[in-house]
Image (cartoon, rainbow, N blue to C red):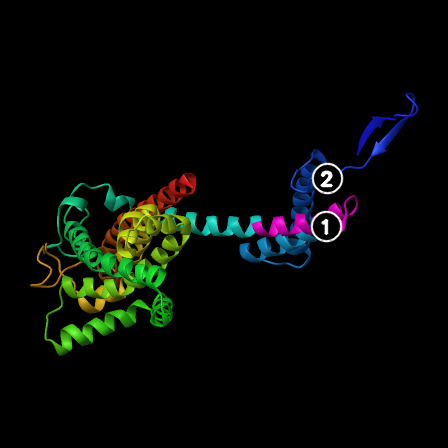
Amino acid sequence: MTVVSSTTDPGATRRVDRPRKIRVMTFDDWMSLGGSLLSSLALVDIVYEHLLDGSGTVGFLVVWYLTFLTIYGIVVAMSNPRTLVVDRLVTSALYAAAGLVIFALGTTVVYTFAKGIHAVAHVNFFTKTMAGVSPTAPLNQGGIFHAIVGTFVEVGIAIAVSVPLGIGTAVYMAEVGGRFSRLVRTVVEAMTALPEILAGLFVYVTLIVEFGLPKSGIAASAAMSVTMVPIIARAAEVALRVVPGGLREASLALGASRWRTVRKVVLPSARAGLATATILGVARGVGETAVVLITSGASSFLTVNPVGSEMNSLPLYIFTSVKTGEPIAISRAFGAASVLLTIVLLLFVITRILAREKAVRR
């Protein structure tokens, strides 16, 4: 509400109604929010904890949140229209959902690092292997060097196979098209939800049972590729379709062939999106446990050759260590989980940075 002077009578004033910005929080809005939080907390504490003799932190938080929404809606409705009341309630629900997700992720990360800090604090944890070391040995003996090397070898081979196949499939779906591309897109979308255990069983039956290959890193890499290719192909197709069509038309108008247009114009323009698709596929493959459990086999020594013998990896090392049930082995497992979690988080941070740079360039 704004007060301005009248044009006909200098001494008179008139009120001009102006629409209020819904997203702007005034002092009254903040007081209503804080008062609703405190009053709902006091009311739930009295009724839930004392009158009804309730117990449990989760139940208390759920009842408190529902009571807060009720009180907050009543308080806002006393001086605001229905549109603003609905907006405030929906905003509160969205903030609560986002806070719940952040809390779940934060507690997972903090708990993992807190449980694994005792193992990570030893230098030998990163430089030694578990060859000849008992699961009950102290933390200053043995390490996960063999699992780290195995993870990078298996993921490296999977990247060498998955990236060309995934990006090539994306180029076919986005640039070539045709009736067969619909079938390819349907298969790719279906495979993005494929459980990794099925990929591991497929590779196990094909390479190990039928062809007689031993459990090795190359078999694990093949199973990882089965799960990584559809992720890379789907994300890369989205990145290619975002490239403006005017660039393609300008290249074709200058006499370039379709393949030269894709190679010189489309792919460089979608470079950041293709890198993002690759990192997303790697993040999917680096944390696979079921595929390596079936195809690679666990080893306690360092193996660089992915073909000759069994090769360990971080997910498999975590699984086998926890399976022993020994407190020292479980501590090592949490240390390995901390390393694996750090790798995955770094990959997603790089993904966000590349996506942000792509948005800025547009």
The magenta-colored residue range is: 71-94
Residue at coordinates 15% horizontally, 43% vertically from top-left?
Answer: 124
Q: What crowding class fits label 1: few (fewer than 14 Cα within 10 Å), some (14-19), or many (20 or more)? A: few
Report the residue marked by disc 1: 83
Q: Residue furthest bottom?
A: 210
User: Which kind of residue does numbered mark 1 sit on?
Assistant: Thr
Q: Nearer the viewer, residue 56 or 117?
A: 117
Residue at coordinates 65% horizontally, 47% vertically from top-left?
Answer: 41
Marks 2 and 1, how far apart at CA: 11 Å
Report the residue marked by disc 2: 20
Residue at coordinates 75% horizontally, 46% vertically from top-left?
Answer: 75
In the structure shown, which secondary structural element does the residue marked by tag 2 occupy?
loop
Residue 260 part of the magenta segment: no
User: Is 305 left, or right, of 103 in this rendering?
Assistant: left
Q: Nearer the viewer, residue 23 or 41?
A: 23
> Looking at the rendering, which quadrant does residue 155 occupy?
bottom left
Q: Residue furthest top?
A: 10
User: Is 216 left, or right, of 256 in this rendering?
Assistant: left
Q: Earlier in the sequence, mark 2 or mark 1?
A: 2
